[in-house]
Image (tube, rainbow, N blue to C red):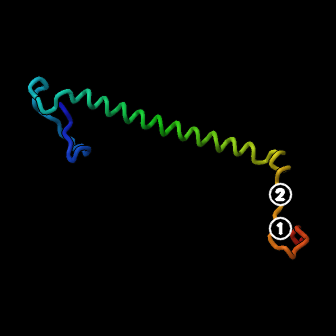
Amino acid sequence: GCPLVRDVFELTGDFCRVPKRRCHRHYCWEKLRRAEVDLERVRVWSQLDELFEQERNVRAAMTNRAGLLALMLHQTIQHDPLCTNLRSPA
């Protein structure tokens, strides 16, 4: 039978004991349950796609991090206008 719920989404662990052909309260519950499972599956695939996109962006940032282009475009910013030596004292 149909799994019984409390407060719309909270499963109780009990099932409807009325035969399927006579239960008008839980009409087509199997189709609704399949639709819920399919919706959850779509949500998980969407989250997985977002995570793959984030991973791809991180990997691209990692490959570009130590490239020659980044070194050539690097600029040193002088925060203290009185300091002329940008090297730290060794």
In front of the other: 19 or 23: 23
Q: What x and y, as percent, mark residue 70?
A: 80, 48
Q: Quadrant of the C terminus?
A: bottom right
Identify the mark at residue 63; answer none if there is no mark: none
Residue beneath disc 1: 78
Secondary structure beneath label 1: loop
Q: What x and y, as percent, mark residue 77?
A: 81, 64
Q: Residue at x 82, y 73 (%)?
A: 80
Q: Quadrant of residue 83?
A: bottom right
Secondary structure beneath label 2: loop
Disc count in the image? 2
Q: Residues within 10 Å of mark 2 (few under 14, many from 20)?
A: few
Q: Residues within 10 Å of mark 1 (few under 14, many from 20)?
A: few
The furthest residue to the bottom: 82
Q: What x and y, as percent, mark residue 33?
A: 27, 31
In front of the other: 75 or 59: 75
Q: What x and y, as percent, mark residue 54?
A: 59, 43
Q: Residue at x 19, y 33 (%)?
A: 2
Identify the mark at residue 75; answer none if there is no mark: 2
The furthest residue to the top: 21
Q: Residue at x 32, y 34 (%)?
A: 36
Q: Quadrant of the N terminus?
A: top left
Amino acid type at circle 1 is Gln
